[in-house]
Amino acid sequence: MLRKSTLVFFALLVSVSFAIAQDGDWGIKFSGFVKSDHFFDTRQTVAAREGHFLLYPAAESMDEDGDDMNATPNFNQLAIQTRLTGKITAPDAFGAKVSGVLEGAFFGHSDPDINGFRLRHAFMKMVWDNTTIIAGQYWHPLFVTAVFPGTVSFNTGVPFQPFSRNPQLRLEQKFGTAVLTLAASSQRDFASPGGSTPLRNAALPNLSAQIQLNPGKNVIGATVDFKQLRPSLADDGKVTGVSLQAFGKADLGSAAVEL
């Protein structure tokens, strides 16, 4: 009976979505890009996706003759960042502007799955004058879009910059130039070393609270992140972790400093 109800609901959802798409004001508009990367490294690197997601140069590894084996250059060419985005518009609800985003790329879920289509973002957003609610897969609060660095390699500052997109329920509340963000997240692609099961078995989502101040063109803020894991069902003990983050961006006229 549950399966039949689910199928009926899905059919209705598809019908409603199709009907909305016929209206000139509501629906989904697709965009995207084809991205081709060609790169050459003078030595071996620690990286993911066949060198595309660069972390840092590999440490020295000496052979019997005292030569550094990792001083060997390498190159690659990839188009796995080719991306498809659907921006969804919908009628207002409860006094809020309603929209959504569906986005994927061919980055793969892991190295063996390179070239596989992977979900990046899939969320709905409700925006009032000072309040925003986001439900779906979006950037984790520890990844602050206002201050992440632009890099030559595609890594946005990893491993120093947290990089994660998570299914979540998120509230953003403005207080003048300050923004308070509260989020309850789960794990999917960016999971703990033991996978997403320990977090799910803890029966408590990853909780985040962040305050961001925006004086002028500057950004400063801090985040508290709480995570509770239950690695094994046979043990009543739980592993608890709390992360603290501070970030900032200073506009100095001709230059900008990001922390």
Image (spheres, rainbow, N blue to C red):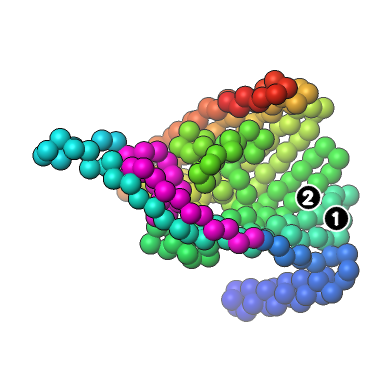
Q: Which residue is mark 2?
A: 126
Q: Tell me the quarter of the image containing the N terminus.
A: bottom right
Q: Compared with residue 55, is residue 48 higher up or lower down, i.e. above or below?
A: below
Which residue lies at the image location 73% right of the left edge and 72% below the top edge? 13
Circle 2 sits in a helix, a strand or a loop, which is it?
strand
* Relative horizontal placement of residue 155, taking residue 144 as reference (left or right): left
Q: Quadrant of residue 216?
A: top right
Circle 1 sits in a helix, a strand or a loop, which is it?
loop
Relative depth, front residue between 259 and 185: 259
Q: Amino acid at mark 1?
A: Ala
Q: Position of residue 233 (x, y in %)?
A: 36, 50
| Disc 2 from disc 1: Cα separation | 8 Å
Task: Look at the image and say whether residue 51 sits in the magenta stretch.
Answer: yes
Q: Which residue is mark 1?
A: 93
Q: Which residues are magenta?
A: 33-58
Which residue lies at the image location 77% right of the left edge and 71% below the top edge? 17
Relative depth, front residue between 71 and 236: 71
Which residue lies at the image location 71% right of the left edge and 41% below the top edge? 171
Q: Position of residue 88 (x, y in %)?
A: 76, 61
Mark toward the start of the polypeptide (2 vs 1): 1
Relative depth, front residue between 234 and 151: 151
Label 1: how many Cα within 10 Å (few below 14, some 14–19, many 20+): few
Which residue lies at the image location 54% right of the left edge and 58% below the top edge? 36
Q: Amino acid at mark 2?
A: Met
Q: Is residue 222 in view from this perspective?
A: no
Q: Position of residue 184 (x, y in %)?
A: 60, 43
Relative depth, front residue between 6 and 15: 15
Q: Position of residue 250 (x, y in %)?
A: 67, 22
Q: Quadrant of residue 174?
A: top right
Q: Tell me the quarter of the image containing the C terminus.
A: top right
